Every structure is written in structure tokens, then in C-alpha cells.
Amino acid sequence: MEKLLTPTHDTTPTTELSAQGLTFGYEPDHRIIQDLSATLTAGQLCAMVGPNAAGKSTLLRLLIGQLQPWSGRVDLDGQDVTAMPPGRRAKWISYVPQRAWASFAFTVGEVVAMGRYALRHDPGAVEHALQCCELDTIRHSIYAHLSVGQQQRVLLARALAQATGHGRVMILDEPGSAMDLRHTHQTMRILVQLARSGVAVLAVLHDLTLAARYADTVWLMNEGQIAAAGPWHDVLTPQTLEPVYRVRIQALNTPDHDRPIFDIQPHHGSSDKLSVTRNTHHDSPKS
């Protein structure tokens, strides 16, 4: 079992991050998020799922105060997130993007240490995060030279270092999308343990089987709104998922696990058919 950084008494079991009536768009005549309300509570791992362009990444940026909503607000324990000074937000909320570019030759250890930039310097927190994500042996490697999967582990470690001591909320955008199988599941187990320690954790996932295996609750996004939210077993059902994803979905039980795996098939007669043409001299029409 992976080592885990545990919050101190500053994290309370009543922590809530709530979105109330959020509306937002990048252009005046095009709304990405539409009158969305949801609550993320401490002690739970929530998976956000949904098709591309559903507004998932935009919602994450609103939740962390990176974007200002057109209307509505985001509160952390009753405090408006966008009104918090950046240093205070960094104290309570950590964020893991899909990928972050480094313009300079920062080492793995230096990138992870950046998680403490707005907080008290804590070498122990950085060291523990490196070990937790199995990065201690490559701490002196250049971040930009790593594979994308390794970079994602570094970003997770940076967020863990940031969360040490005060973290109440961790928000992640497809944290294991480029990782190999072992590190993907290791990452999910870390998030489960983090949630059990009292942190509210929200992770965007595209793998429905991964969401079903590890999540406590699920938000299903569709066209800028939450189409369904609740315990994983209520949301991750073919009846709920199929109208949103527009594919046939079958939930399969496995003998060695009490949570399902999902088999995905295109709808019969859908417009998803692909037309593939071989363009070789053998198939070329004669003139």
C-alpha cells in the first residue's frame, strides 16, 4: 500500500466545496456551463465523467477560482473561492492539470517543491510526496525530459506536497490518462486514501470502469450541466450513461470484484460508422 500524506486537524470532516448556479462561457454568445449546482464533500472520492466538450475542464477551473463565473458562485465552507487571495486558496485547494509545461530545466524535485510555494517550506512534505509517487529515484531528472505519464506523477506529487498539513480539497483533470496500468491504479489508490483521510477529492476520468472501481460518488456531465449525480452505483448504469454517451453500454460483473466493468459498443444504425478506403495501386480504378 502506498504511503500517504495525511492532513492535520486543520481539515475537518464538514468541509464542503459547493457550486451554486454557475454559468460561464469564453464567448458572450456561447455558454459552456449553464446554471450548474453541485457539492463536493470531505471524505469522498468523486469522479466526474462525461463526453468531450461537456464542460468538465472548465468546471474544474471555476471550482478552483481560476475562472470568474458569469453568474453564481463557488464556496469553500461558506467562503467565496474567487474572493480568496491566491495564497489562501493554495493553502486549502490543490489542483492537478492534465499536463504542465516547464520552460526551464527544473528537476523533478524542484517541481514537486513548487507545491509549497505559497505555504511554509516543508522538505519533509516534499520528500514524502516523492516517495508516495515513486519519484525519489528520479528526483534529479529534468521534468521536461520525462514521459508524459511520468510528468503526470510529478504533478500529483506536487499537489500532495501542497496538501500536506492544510489540504481540504484536491481537484484533478484526467490524472492518469497517460500513465501505464500500474501507476494509474496506484494513483487511484492514493486518491482513495486521501479521501479517507478527510480530503474532498474530485477527479475527471474517461474510463468508466476505473470510476466504478474507485469512486464513492459520480458527477455525469453533459452539455454544460450535471445530468446525474450521486453514489457510483446509481449513476454508473447503462440506463443513465447511454443517452449521454450515445453508445450501447453493458455493465459486466466479475467474480473477483464487487464492482462492474463496462463494455462499450456503438449504437446500431448510428452516424458513427467509419468509411475506410484503401488507396493502393491494386484498388485504383482503371482509366
Image (cartoon, grey):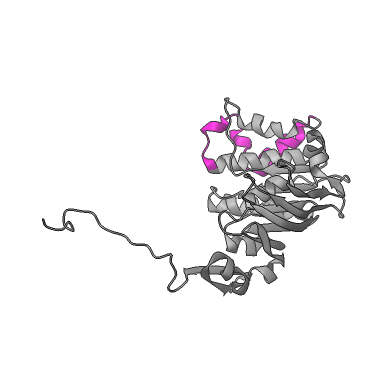
Which corner quadrant holds the C terminus?
A: bottom left
- Residue located farthest toward the left when viewing the structure as drawn: 287
Q: Position of residue 171 (x, y in %)?
A: 70, 48
Drawn side of residue 278 relative to residue 210, left or right: left
Residue range (magenta): 121-148
- Residue 5 placed where, x, y %? 76, 44
In the image, is residue 223 part of the stretch drawn in magenta?
no
**Percent x, y of residue 36:** 73, 57
Q: Would residue 281 appear left or right of 68 to someone viewing this image?
A: left
Q: How many circles with numbers are drawn on the protein?
A: 0
Q: Is residue 181 left or right of residue 58?
A: left
Q: Residue at x 83, y 42 (%)?
A: 166
Closest to the observer, 67 or 16: 67
> What secondary structure characterizes most of the magenta part?
helix
Residue at image position (53%, 67%) is 246
Q: Nearer the viewer, residue 150 or 223?
A: 223
